[in-house]
Image (cartoon, rainbow, N blue to C red):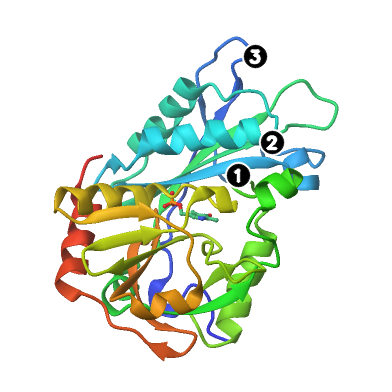
Amino acid sequence: VTPYPHPEETVTVSSPVLFVLHSPTTDHPAADPVRTDALAPILRVDDLGVTRGDGIFETINAVDGHPQALDAHLARFELSASMLELPAPAVETWRRAALAALDAHPHVPELLLKLVMTRGVEGGDRCTGWVVAFPNTDFSRQRTEGIDLVTLDRAYPADVMTAAPWLLQGAKTISYAMNMAALRYARACGADDAIFVSTEGVVLEGPNSTLVAKFGDRLVTPPTDLGILAGTSQARLFRWAQERGLSTSYERFKVDDLDGADTLWVCSSGRLAVPVRTLDGTPRTWDADLHAAALTHLRTARD
Ligand SMILES: Cc1ncc(COP(=O)(O)O)c(C=O)c1O
């Protein structure tokens, strides 16, 4: 099993920067986020985030000091909160906390800003919220050389959102133990990452990524009504592609349909877009020039 992160992709060691939000939601009077010692204990053992994994998060990549797709991340944070029936996040306080954490951290090429809000202490009257800033893993190797991907069965039907909304598919919850288990399983299979398929074989998303397929001058990704996250990186890639005259669409497709794709990307805020080198062991090609241009855009665009 390949250890993770890969030895050459370990995170730079430095102290994370932490801001705690004492009024993370709109149902309490606003209060400024407070910088707090990141190594000091701030979570109670009876916080429902810890005891039940009951909460939501976002991870934003700040490239060269610019937090990418900040509005889209904050909007998805609000959507996740409503899906979990949590009080509405005080979005402007979260924005301030994220920007303050970015500002307070020493400059690094890529800084991750992680926003977490839990249902709070059991029996308490408010959510727990914090923003932590820490350097991104160096993904340059994956971004240039590509990754090996395996398909894994998510064992949910394509209509999971309406058939079983309590499974919270499509919300970005902090219950990621299953996602991490899927990544370990993929690595035990000798791959770098996984892509889930529904019980019907419909392609969904990765444990922490969105799949985008290119068929000639058309980019396609699965629709969110399959119970998957609306990827902010995929959306940025789509906007860039549209500006270049490529068409984009949200469509249901099966693994076999990917045979006709000339490029497959795995997209996420941390990795931006990485090309797929093999899918279930079968070598894949990718459009190297287009990929390089897309990557440059995803790194440099201030959207
Ligand atoms: C399940 C899942 N799907 C998709 C994504 C990609 O989203 P984004 O590009 O906004 O980071 C993530 C991000 O971590 C994720 O956890």
Residue 221 can be seen in this image: yes
Q: Amino acid at mark 3?
A: Asp
* Rendered view: 203 above or below 94: below
Counting residues from the N terminus, which is met first, the one under dot 2 or under dot 1? 2
Q: Nearer the viewer, residue 104 or 258?
A: 258
Residue 7 horizontal/vertical position (percent): 44, 79
Say whether marks 3 and 2 touch (CB < 8 Å): no
Q: Position of residue 162 (x, y in %)?
A: 69, 45
**In this image, 98 relative to 141: left or right?**
right
Tell me the distance, in whole angstroms, between the alpha carbons under discs 3 and 2.
16 Å
| Picture disc at residue 171 | 1
Q: At x 21% / y 74%, what residue is drawn?
A: 287
Residue at 46 percent of width and 50 percent of height:
15
Observer-nearest of 94 and 45? 94
Above or below for 218 versus 132: below
Q: Is residue 197 left or right of residue 17?
A: right
Please state, as top left, top right, bottom left or bottom right, where the N terminus lies in the image. bottom right
Tell me if label 2 and label 1 are in contact, CB under 8 Å. yes
Labels 3 and 2: the sequence-earlier one: 3
Q: Which residue is mark 2?
A: 84
Mark 3 vs mark 1: give the one in front. 1
Q: Position of residue 284 (x, y in %)?
A: 34, 84
| Few, some or many residues within 10 Å of mark 3 (<14, 14–19, 20+) | few
| Residue shown at 42% from the left, 34% from the top | 98
Name the amino acid, label 1.
Ala
Residue at mark 2 to residue at mark 1: CA–CA distance = 8 Å
Q: Is residue 36 visible?
A: no
Q: Is residue 155 above or below residue 230?
A: below
Residues packed near mark 1 inside 10 Å, few (<14), some (14 to 19) or many (20 plus): many
Under tag 3, what secondary structure?
loop
Question: Which residue position holds label 3?
Answer: 27
Type of residue at label 2? Leu
